[in-house]
Image (cartoon, rainbow, N blue to C red):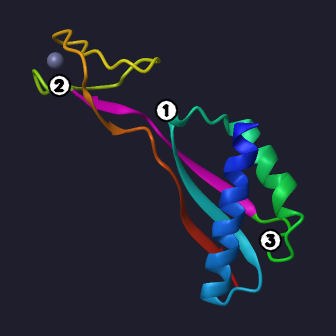
Amino acid sequence: MHEFGIMESVVEVVREEAARAGLRRVERVAMVVGERTAVLPEALELAWEALRDGEPFAPGARLEVEWRQAEAACPACGLRYHPEGGFLLVCPGCGALGGELLAGEELRVASIEGE
Ligand SMILES: [Zn+2]
């Protein structure tokens, strides 16, 4: 499962950051995830719950995910649009191919809170 591997990396980041910040207990982890990462919200939450309870620093810690919509810019006409599925970016305004993806591929830990 794609999401399980992602959360294993997230738990590692949280463990390191908690140690650096001197947190004994992590209560909340915030992530930013773009819609083009193909991550499923339910699977991400399940993986988090399975992994966090095996960590002494994060039992019951909440995961908050901010989902980012994808946005692309057309190189020909400059239009900013929401790209529909698939890997190909096609401008809905002028039909040009190969737009630049401005958002939607985010996958990161935004913040960690605890005490
Ligand atoms: Zn265009």
Tell me whether circle 2 and circle 3 mark residues in contact (CB < 8 Å). no
User: On the rendering, which quadrant does ligand 1 occupy?
Assistant: top left
Which residue occupies the foreground of this view, 28 or 43? 43
Tell me whether circle 1 and circle 3 mark residues in contact (CB < 8 Å). no
The mark that comes first in sequence, 1 or 3, is 1
Classify 31 as above or below 37: below
Q: Tell me, yes or no, whether the highlighted magenta stretch contains residue 71.
A: yes
Q: Secondary structure at mark 2?
A: loop
Going by the image, does 54 lie left or right of 61?
right
Q: Tell me, yes or no, whether the highlighted magenta stretch contains residue 54.
A: no
Q: Residues within 10 Å of mark 1 (few under 14, many from 20)?
A: many
- The single residue placed furthest to the top in the displayed view is 95
Tell me whether circle 2 and circle 1 mark residues in contact (CB < 8 Å). no
Which residue lies at the image location 66% right of the left edge and 90% below the top edge? 22
Which residue lies at the image location 77% right of the left edge and 65% below the top edge? 61
- Which secondary structure is most common in the magenta stretch? strand
Q: Which residue is mark 3?
A: 58
Q: Which residue is mark 1?
A: 36
Quadrant location, the C terminus: bottom right
User: How far across and how far down the image is residue 88, in percent?
Assistant: 37, 18
Q: Kindly tell me whether mark 2's CB lies below 8 Å from ligand 1.
A: yes
